[in-house]
Image (cartoon, rainbow, N blue to C red):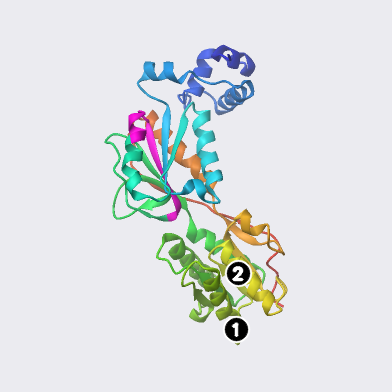
Amino acid sequence: MTTLKDVGRRAGVSASTVSLVLNGRDAGRVQPSISARVRLAARELGYAPNLVARSLRTNQSHTIGLLSDQVASTPFAGQMLQGAQQTAWEAGYLLLLIDTAGNADLEKPAIQALAQRNIDALIYASTYHREVALPEVPSGTPFLLLDGRPAGDAHVDWVAPDEVAGAAAAVEHFVSRGHRRIGFINSGESIPAARGRLEGYFSALRAAGIEPDDRLISTLTDRSIAATEVSAAALLDLPDRPTAIFCFNDRVAAGLYREAARRGLSIPRDLSIIGFDDDQSVIEHLTPSLTTVQLPHRAMGVWAVERLLDGLRTEGDSTPEGFLMPCRLIVRDSVAPPS
């Protein structure tokens, strides 16, 4: 069994330094480059801490609970969970997941089950960026919302995508290629993602000196393929149709690809398209490859655990905050100058 001394020998440091790093007490005590070397050595040697002994010694379980509402069955779940799990593991913590499958009646007993295992902190992961009614969490348990923000004026830590900046980046890319008539197919749901992406669309147009035209905005009536086709047709059938269209997500973009093909329009020669999400299950079927805005699921998972660990190290002596994670524009082949 690999020991702290073994890790120390591999990293060229003392066992006490290894202990500081792997117990998350290295901030301000150990140089970041040395901490990275220790974590790498621990991974290479397959070091696993004795969590039972540590729990008895510190009165901490070194376990973080993660409660989700279907996140385990969504396309992006793997990225979010990988980011959270790796960050927790490298700090010597275990991530314990319970998925309620969207059943609100399971939420309270699920939290109680996690609390009975003496978790040190709890993450509530949303299926998508939305406003979340806070669950009942045991008093004194550090709590954070992942991919959601609190409904009302509740004060808790949360992290979500920067929808506004992400949408603005998409429109700015169209403008940089010479487009002026830029359409938008948006979700009809009253959610932060829809509101934020519309705000980003408007702000980027105005920054480019383009007056927004309501005729170039089409709103989905629901999430069905039929609704996507109707919204796409509404823009493509305009007498002076847009030369570029920004889509609420990649599935909408896929529907727009189909409608464009029915009309004999070539992408990107006749119509440029940008999506949102970077959903590989959709993108892998699209030709030409779709330019899109990538949701930062892995980065949000990392941030969530790091934020909770910081709170545990300072014993919660910090003001709750919300953080909007930047979304990266992934440039592929679906945008060209207007013909």
Q: What percent of the width, then of the height, locates residue 299?
A: 53, 44
- How many labels, in total? 2
Q: What stretch is highlighted in magenta?
A: 113-129
Point out the tag, 2 or 1, that comes first from the N-terminus.
Answer: 1
Residue occupied by mark 2: 255
Q: Does residue 125 show up magenta in the picture? A: yes
Q: What percent of the width, then of the height, locates residue 6?
A: 60, 13
**As displayed, is residue 24 above or below residue 333?**
above
Q: Does residue 186 show up magenta in the picture? A: no
Placement of the C terminus among the 4 image quadrants: bottom right
Q: Residue sitting at 48 percent across and 20 percent down?
A: 20
Q: Residue sitting at 51 percent across and 41 percent down?
A: 81
Which residue is more in the foreground, 259 or 11?
Answer: 259
Which residue is more in the foreground, 222 or 131?
Answer: 222
Residue 91 is at least partly visible in this image: yes
Circle 1: residue type: Asp
Q: What percent of the width, then of the height, locates residue 290?
A: 66, 62
Q: Residue sitting at 55 percent across and 28 percent down?
A: 32
For the residues labelled 2 and 1, say whether their Cβ atoms are less than 8 Å apart.
Answer: no
Residue occupied by mark 1: 237
**As displayed, is residue 52 above or below residue 303?**
above
Circle 2: residue type: Gly
Q: Residue sitting at 61 percent across and 80 percent down?
A: 236
Residue 210 is at least partly visible in this image: no
Placement of the N terminus among the 4 image quadrants: top right
Q: Quadrant of residue 67?
A: top left
**As displayed, is residue 242 above or below residue 27?**
below
**Outermost residue, bottom direction?**
239
Classed neighbour count for the residue bearing mark 2: other residues with Cα under 10 Å, few (<14), some (14–19), many (≥20): many
Look at the numbered disc 1 and give the secondary structure of its residue.
loop
